[in-house]
């Protein structure tokens, strides 16, 4: 995770600087106006992203529904998103569920209020035996407007702020999607996007007509030149037009509700805030989610990986996503898992090659950009190389850690009778060689002949030669799917040596097995050792009896 964090900082720092302060300051001014913050307030973006997530999920086993959710603060100075998940609704028969995503602006108060109170208001509006589909659509519309009224009663007068709202109500027969703002939902059916919501922006014809009729203006594609969405909970400064109902104000809390008849081919519905959609298309998200489901990932872990991918692709906003899977969702596929393992192993080997061939230690961002310029087959659809940033960062981190450990001073207790001791940590090739003849430089007392793995300057230096057997260095063959490299017989990370494992007669260091085998011995020929210079003889004076030193 630390390596991935550094990679995000390196890749996204230019984008952060551009978003935080444009050439003429216009972007920063618009951001301050949208978030309701004064120019002298704290910066809207952090110096480094906050990637911490708490993925969670659940299931309704009786009718085959699974869900997962996760959220990340990202580069924003504050977390203003909120979400809720109710896989079962009290008072309604089995098969009903409610999910919601709320993206706040000007603070998180409105988003948290919606996540806490909107499910209860929906239940109140539905009643014990709701009719479908029109009565349910009316109930959702009434619940959104009721939530806005209650929020207005609690809202401090004159204080800016509000939130977009996106809700999915699942019934045994229909899927109801209600939304106001720019958070989006997408339904995947039979491997394709069958439905997705449309953002409520001031330039949409219906939204534009309502804003102008209420006496507002549209400047810079924003309501009165400030608010980027035309429907939201809160934002009461835009709901003061006299003589007009709430749904006809400049900014309305009335949701757009769609009822979709359920089919056996329904796979999943993805709900996400605009921080996800800023860098991913609907088709790209659907393809990425389907490919991860074929690996057998739980929905909550899939959501966490999705947000990591969006961070790597350049999202600078808060991000929240909820994945709701139906019985028709793709299941685990052995062939997909095999291809994924092969891809992870190939990426690990390529990272090792780039580090070995460089004259100086390459940065993680340089390694990533080099890989991005290459044609790598079988990358996940929609995510591409960005969805493999965790694998790349983990492989690079292991190599960097090995190089740092190689440069540590040797521990006490490792010296032999000959006065030589090997490095405390080292990286070996299965045949006893280092990284293509490349290895860390040991202390002067442990130097070997030229060409020995312990006589090379750095794990990242050298000329990239092959081993004597002609084999290329191999890194882990089967990395784990979630970004951790699994151990294999390729690279062997040695541990601290001891007197029992070090023999001055053979001048070799055992690393866990016999020489020439994976995890074997790294040995150096006694004949090729550099002879240690003898200390100069210091003449000594005769003692008081006139005897020479060493005499009887």
Image: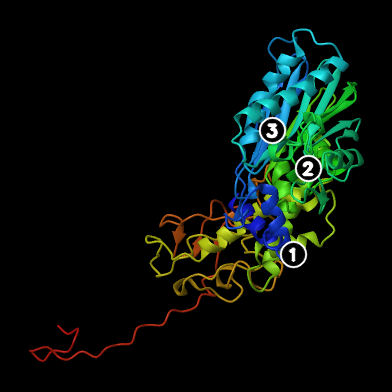
Q: Is 434 on the left or on the right of 526, as rendered?
A: right
Percent position of residue 537, x then y: 30, 87
**Image coloring type:** rainbow
Q: Earlier in the sequence, mark 2 or mark 3?
A: 3
Q: Which residue is mark 1?
A: 470
Query: Between disc 2 and disc 1, whose residue precedes?
Result: 2
Circle 1: element type:
loop
Relative height, residue 171 to residue 168 (above, below):
above
Q: Which residue matches tag 2? A: 229
Q: Find residue 501 and report its horizontal and vertical position in percent.
A: 46, 56
Q: Quadrant of residue 399?
A: bottom right
Report the number of numbered marks.
3
**Res 234 quadrant in image:** top right
Picture layout, residue 144 above or below residue 80: above
Q: Secondary structure at mark 2?
A: loop
The quadrant the C terminus occupies is bottom left
Q: Which mark is residue 69?
A: 3
Structural crowding at the residue carrying mark 3, measured as other residues with C-alpha within 10 Å and reported as few (<14), some (14–19) or many (≥20): many
Residue at the front extreme, as displayed? 243
Which residue is at the front of the view, 120 or 291? Answer: 120
Q: State the residue at coordinates (74%, 26%).
A: 144
Q: CA distance from mark 2 to mark 1?
A: 62 Å
Q: Earlier in the sequence, mark 3 or mark 1?
A: 3
- What x and y, as percent, mark residue 219? 81, 52
Q: Which label lies toward us, 2 or 1?
A: 2
Q: Is residue 229 above or below residue 330?
A: below
Q: Nearer the viewer, residue 448 or 490?
A: 490
Q: Please tell me in which quadrant of the rendered image residue 350 appears.
A: bottom right
Looking at the picture, tell me which residue is in the foreground, 486 or 53. Answer: 53
C-alpha distance separating marks 2 and 3: 24 Å
Instruction: Kindly identify the residue that appears in the image at 61 percent across and 33 percent down.
Output: 155
Q: Mark 3 against mark 1, which lies toward the viewer?
A: 3
């Amino acid at each position: 995770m630390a390596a991935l964090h550094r990679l995000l900082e390196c890749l996204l720092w230019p984008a952060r600087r551009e978003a935080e302060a444009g050439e003429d300051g216009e972007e920063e001014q618009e951001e301050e106006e949208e978030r309701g913050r004064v120019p002298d307030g704290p910066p809207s973006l952090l110096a480094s992203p906050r990637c911490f997530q708490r993925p969670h999920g659940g299931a309704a086993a009786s009718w085959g529904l699974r869900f997962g959710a996760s959220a990340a603060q990202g580069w924003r100075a504050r977390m203003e998103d909120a979400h809720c998940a109710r896989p079962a609704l009290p008072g309604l028969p089995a098969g009903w569920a409610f999910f919601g995503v709320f993206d706040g602006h000007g603070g998180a108060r409105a988003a948290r209020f919606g996540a806490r109170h909107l499910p209860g208001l929906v239940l109140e509006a539905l009643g014990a035996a709701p009719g479908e589909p029109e009565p349910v659509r009316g109930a959702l519309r009434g619940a959104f407007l009721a939530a806005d009224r209650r929020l207005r009663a609690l809202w401090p007068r004159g204080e800016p702020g509000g939130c977009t709202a996106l809700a999915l109500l699942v019934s045994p027969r229909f899927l109801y999607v209600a939304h106001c703002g720019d958070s989006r939902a997408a339904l995947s059916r039979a491997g394709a996007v069958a439905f997705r919501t449309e953002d409520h922006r001031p330039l949409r014809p219906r939204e534009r007509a309502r804003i102008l009729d209420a006496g507002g203006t549209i400047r810079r594609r924003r309501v009165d030149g400030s608010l980027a969405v035309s429907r939201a909970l809160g934002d009461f400064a835009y709901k003061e037009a006299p003589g007009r109902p709430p749904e006809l104000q400049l900014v309305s809390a009335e949701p757009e509700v769609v009822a979709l008849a359920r089919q056996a081919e329904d796979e999943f519905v993805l709900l996400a805030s605009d921080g996800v959609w800023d860098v991913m298309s609907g088709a790209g998200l659907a393809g990425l989610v389907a490919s991860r489901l074929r690996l057998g990932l739980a929905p909550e872990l899939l959501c966490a990986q999705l947000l990591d991918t969006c961070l790597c692709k350049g999202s600078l906003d808060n991000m929240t996503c909820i994945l709701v899977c139906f019985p028709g969702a793709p299941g685990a596929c052995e062939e997909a898992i095999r291809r994924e393992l092969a891809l992870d192993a190939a990426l690990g080997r390529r990272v090792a090659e780039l580090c070995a061939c460089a004259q100086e230690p390459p940065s993680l961002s340089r390694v990533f950009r080099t890989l991005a310029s290459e044609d790598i087959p079988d990358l996940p659809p929609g995510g591409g190389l960005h969805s493999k940033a965790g694998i790349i960062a983990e492989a690079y981190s292991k190599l960097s850690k090995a190089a740092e450990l190689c440069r540590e001073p040797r521990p006490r207790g490792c010296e032999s009778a000959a006065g030589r001791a090997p490095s405390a940590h080292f990286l070996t090739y299965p045949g006893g060689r280092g990284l293509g003849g490349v290895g860390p430089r040991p202390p002067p007392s442990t130097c070997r002949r030229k060409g020995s793995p312990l006589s090379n300057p750095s794990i990242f230096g050298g000329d990239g030669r092959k081993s004597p057997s002609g084999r290329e260095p191999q890194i882990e063959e089967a990395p784990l799917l979630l970004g951790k490299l699994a151990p294999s017989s390729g690279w062997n990370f040695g541990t601290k040596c001891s007197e029992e494992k070090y023999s001055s007669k053979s001048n070799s260091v055992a690393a866990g097995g016999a020489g020439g085998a994976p995890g074997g011995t790294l040995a150096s020929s006694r004949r090729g050792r550099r002879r240690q210079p003898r200390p100069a003889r210091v003449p000594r004076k005769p003692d008081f009896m006139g005897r020479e030193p060493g005499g009887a």
